[in-house]
Image (cartoon, helix red, strand yellow):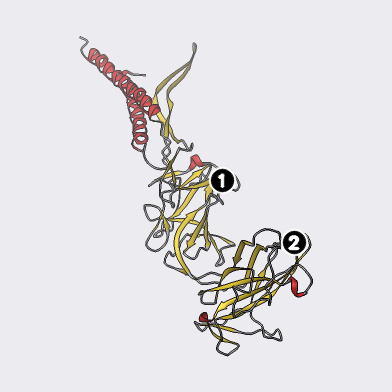
Amino acid sequence: MSISSSLYTALSGLSSNATAMSVTGDNISNINTTGFKSSSSQFEDILGVSLSGVSGSNQTGAGAVLQSIDVNFTQGTFDTTSVPTDLAINGKGFFIVKDPSTGAEFYTRDGHFHFDNQGYYVDEQGDRVQGFLYDSTGTNLIENLSDIQVNQNSMIPPQVTTTAQMVLNLNSSATPPANGFEIADPTGTSNYTTPITIYDSLGQAHTIQVYFTNVSNTGTNGANTWEWDAVISSSDVSLVGGKKPTGDYVEFGSGQLVFNPDGSLQSPTTAVTLRDQDIDKNAVTITYANGVDSTDSTIDFTGTSQYGSVSAIQSVNQNGYAPGSASGISVDAQGNVTANYTNGTVKKIAGLTLANFADINGLARSGNNNYAETVASGQPLLNEPGNAGMGTLSSSMLEESNVDLAGEIINMIVLQRGYEANSKVITTIDDMMNTLINIR
């Protein structure tokens, strides 16, 4: 190999070390970039001359070249934020985002997302986060990859009360009123009372006061018998069976509770009707003051007891609610995007979907913390967080860059020395050529 060719050998060293220095500089500059993955430079030699002679093989190298720039996909540490829409993946997988203008899909570990003015879940570039949407009931996933959108100004319609549950203890030592329950004086002719709120078809709340009266001395069903009476204020009622109400209260429903000697509930064993009835036990329609008719509903006393302790309510529930507007959005570890409404209801809107690849090193960097699918990477494998080896999600957290600053500084020193050494080779070859030219 000639002296002049040695210049190009040293030049290859300069070029490859300069490119590797660019990679190191890129790593250091992105030390605070969310979800950034560092890269490393891999060198390989160049074979210049390979001759075979009597004395054997004679092989001379022609320098070095950058073989590849490999991405290090190890997980970075998590940084806690105060933003509930920020997400970090704990484990394998990438978020999927789509450019709305081109339809191109990208993959990223940067979970710094927010909702834009159209309700789309987007990254900082406006690319829309992808996932599976729930149906209108918020229970079943429709497994077609779609933009995640939440209308934070929307209202959820009201739910009329159709079922109620009440569990309480009635004091077995309570003295039965002399004449039993009287609606004209409900408080004075009962032993215990507790309210329950129900909702009509417009979502307006109505307070029903339930009175419990010990009627064991009446002989009805023997001992351990209580009567319950559900009462509503006449001020909240316009009509009862088509007629204006009389008195301060309207009977909304009634029945009996019979207990076993051990204090457990003997009957009823199932939910009973909660509505007013006339003397012949025919249903009577109650029209509320707002003009809405009451709806047939049931009440379940299962679990109620009669023990020798103070009467007390243990739980009361019903399935109705008022209309409500979205008050907040949250994302759980399984990627469920959930809307919280002002009426206390919670509804699943979408399920975030993660992507993985047969060869993640085959992904191509596309800028903005995104990667693009290539032939080398293979097609994306889609799964919900926590399934099929995918990582889970942590909300209000972001994954930090995985750049090791100490390692990069050391690598930078090594590359600098390599660059200087190759520069010295060129200087030495120049001196040799100058000596040659000056031979006389």
Judge whether 112 appears above or below 302 on screen. above
* Image quarter (top left, top right, bottom left or bottom right) of the N terminus: top left
SS for callout 1: loop
Disc 2: which residue: 264
Furthest toward the bottom, the residue is 243
* Residue pictured at 52% horizontal, 59% vertical: 350
Q: State which tag comes first along the sequence, 1 or 2.
A: 2
Circle 2 crowding by C-alpha within 10 Å: few under 14, some 14–19, many from 20: some
Q: Position of residue 279 (x, y in %)?
A: 69, 86
Q: Position of residue 435 (x, y in %)?
A: 23, 12
SS for callout 2: loop
Q: Which mark is residue 390?
A: 1
What amino acid type is highlighted by mark number 1? Met
In front: 357, or 377?
357
The reply, left or right, for residue 221 in relation to residue 151 is right
* Residue pictured at 43% horizontal, 38% vertical: 37
In front: 98, or 197?
197
Report, in whole angstroms, how far the alpha carbon at label 1 lies from the one at label 2.
49 Å
